[in-house]
Amino acid sequence: MKNIIAILLCVSGFLAKAQNPDTTAKIDSAKILALPDTVRHLESRFLSFIPPAVFISYGILSLEVKGIRQVDYNVYDDLIRKHPTFRNHIENYFQYAPAMIVYGLNLAGIQGKNTFIDRSALYLLSNVIAQGTTFATKRVISRERPDRSDNYSFPSGHTANAFAAAEFMAQEYAEKSPWFGVIGYSFATATAVLRVYNRDHWFSDIITGAGVGILSTKAAYLLYPLIRNTLFRVDNETKSSIVIPTYQNGVTGFAFIKRF
């Protein structure tokens, strides 16, 4: 198990450093709610797509290849032998840590690549893709969990969520320092390992979940600019759009204003 954790951490470091540092958009915090055409398309290096693709391929093969599936049983047997009473569900919080760190850094004045609204929309879209994919796959595959609690083991939703958040952190802050990505992926790796230690998932479940999470965020960064710029594109300085928080008669909300 220690070797597996080491491999995951090495891959995490590779992913964190594989982000393109030229994708930065310098955003003035005073424009946090403005909607100019500043969202950048995904510009990750090609190599950063290889690990998640390999992860997902490994998980798919585990469904049919006995030798790969046997790894799941071997990891589980080793875990039961060495840590028979382990129970700690701190991964329920770890999975959100990278995303929370992103917002904490922003509050501390360390600006990421996108404005608050765009960043939040990107994170939401990545989660919709990740959780939609994992939920649908769980229903179709119907693999029993190690603890036999249900048949929604493959792939790991917690892991997908954690790695989606880690990739989100890397996309927003890797240009500042690759260590931000390493921190995010460390939390994601811890989440994945704990899902196995808590008998909630097989090894191949978390590997697949990691791949799904990473690709979900990359997909969000690819799709969101197209969606956003179609709805809120500003062609010149005489046109602008803005979203303003509102509060009236005890009801909060948002007002959208577009000037032509």
Image (cartoon, rainbow, N blue to C red):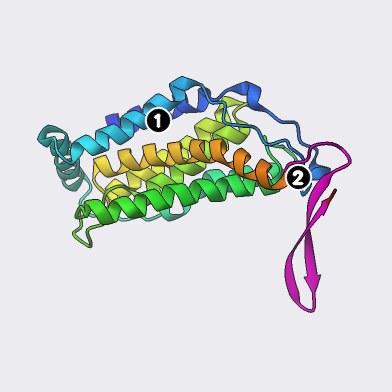
The residue closer to the viewer here, 151 or 180, is 151
Mark 2 closeness class: few <14, some 14–19, many ≥20 residues within 10 Å: many
**Seen in the image, is 12 located left or right of residue 6?**
right
Do the CB atoms of the residues marked 2 and 1 lie less than 8 Å apart? no
The residue closer to the viewer here, 4 or 259, is 259
- Give the x, y percent position of residue 184: 51, 38
Which residue is under mark 2? Answer: 35
SS of the residue at dot 1? helix
- Which of the 4 image quadrants contains residue 122? top right
- Give the x, y percent position of residue 65: 13, 35
- Give the x, y percent position of residue 205: 28, 44
* Amino acid marked by disc 2: Leu
Q: Which residue shows up at 14% across the image and 44% down it?
A: 77
Residue 141 lies in the magenta stretch: no
* Amino acid marked by disc 1: Leu
Q: Residue furthest left?
A: 66
Residue 238 lies in the magenta stretch: yes
SS of the residue at dot 2? loop
Q: Which residues are magenta?
A: 233-258
On the question of residue 109 being in view, the answer is: yes
Which residue is under mark 1? Answer: 9
